[in-house]
Image: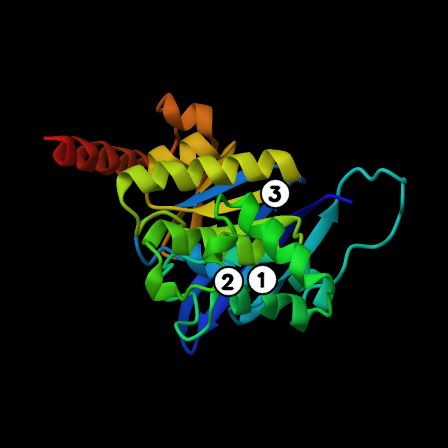
Amino acid sequence: MSYGIEANNLRVTYGNFVAVADTSLAVGPGETFGIVGESGSGKSTVLRALCGLAPVARGTVRLVAGSTVDNSHEAPPLPGSKTFRRLVQMVFQDPYGSLHPRQTVDRILAEPLAIHGIGDAERRIQQALDEVGLGSGYRFRYPHQLSGGQRQRIAIARALILEPQILLLDEPTSSLDASVQAEVLNLLEDLRQRRVLTFIMVSHDLAVVTHMCERLMVMQRGETVELVSSSDLAGSRVSHDYTRRLMEASIGFRRARAA
């Protein structure tokens, strides 16, 4: 079964501070969806709320079932359930901080299998490493023995090892060198196509999101400014001044970096 995900009137608060204000989104099975905005706009908090890592003060999150091979009519698993947590996995921004420094790659990949009671760990660990382009030689290394790109591949493998349907990608390449960014993005797109995954990607880089995603949500101060297709964004066919300013800032940054 394939799944998409929906959030309706999602609100996240920390004390009196409203991090996300009544935001809604609907991402279909197999779709790639982007969330963009300046730092502090609430885009990463939306991802954390979708997978249960941020406190939801109001609103709902639910999985949406797509087509099935056996035409099963099982109800999608509920948020907070073990099945939901297995199907919705997150890849964090910082590959240096998201892996336990005192655990080997083997232990890092074995842990989610043990938590979810999934057997056949030997085969699954090797398969996960192969899928992200790392061989068995990396299995007993520690994170400090890996490059940034290799660490992020391990983080992706850790998410994939549970065979999720939805990957939440929080700036997955922002801390990597430009050449490594391209490699990781190509890996993610290949995995998405082979596994028919649903992606929600947060990024400050409009070029990356436009390349990877079919539709985008623009956020400012915890609120949705507009929804736009990647083709419309690429063609500057946007309706909100804030989106235009983001585009101008992104173009200016790329020109300054190239100079």
Determine contact: label 1, label 3, CB under 8 Å: no
> Which residue is the extreme one toward the bottom?
15
The residue wearing badge 2 is 48
The residue wearing badge 3 is 198
The image position of residue 170, as x and y in percent, is 43, 53
Q: Where's the C terminus, which quadrant?
A: top left
- Image vertical order of residue 117 relative to residue 28, above or below: below
> Which residue is the extreme one toward the top?
235
Between 116 and 142, the one lying in front of the other is 142
CA separation in Å, label 3 and label 2: 16 Å
Kindly identify which numbered label has been placed on residue 205.
none
CA separation in Å, label 1 and label 3: 14 Å
Q: Amino acid at mark 2?
A: Arg
Secondary structure state at the residue bearing disc 2: helix
CA separation in Å, label 1 and label 2: 5 Å
Determine contact: label 1, label 2, CB under 8 Å: yes
Query: Which quadrant of the view contains residue 84?
Result: bottom right
Can the viewer see residue 52 in this picture?
Answer: yes
Query: Residue at 34% of width from left, 41% of height from top?
Result: 181
Secondary structure state at the residue bearing disc 3: strand
The residue wearing badge 1 is 51
Q: Amino acid at mark 1?
A: Cys
Q: Considering only order in the chain, which callout, 3 or 1, is on the residue closer to the N terminus?
A: 1
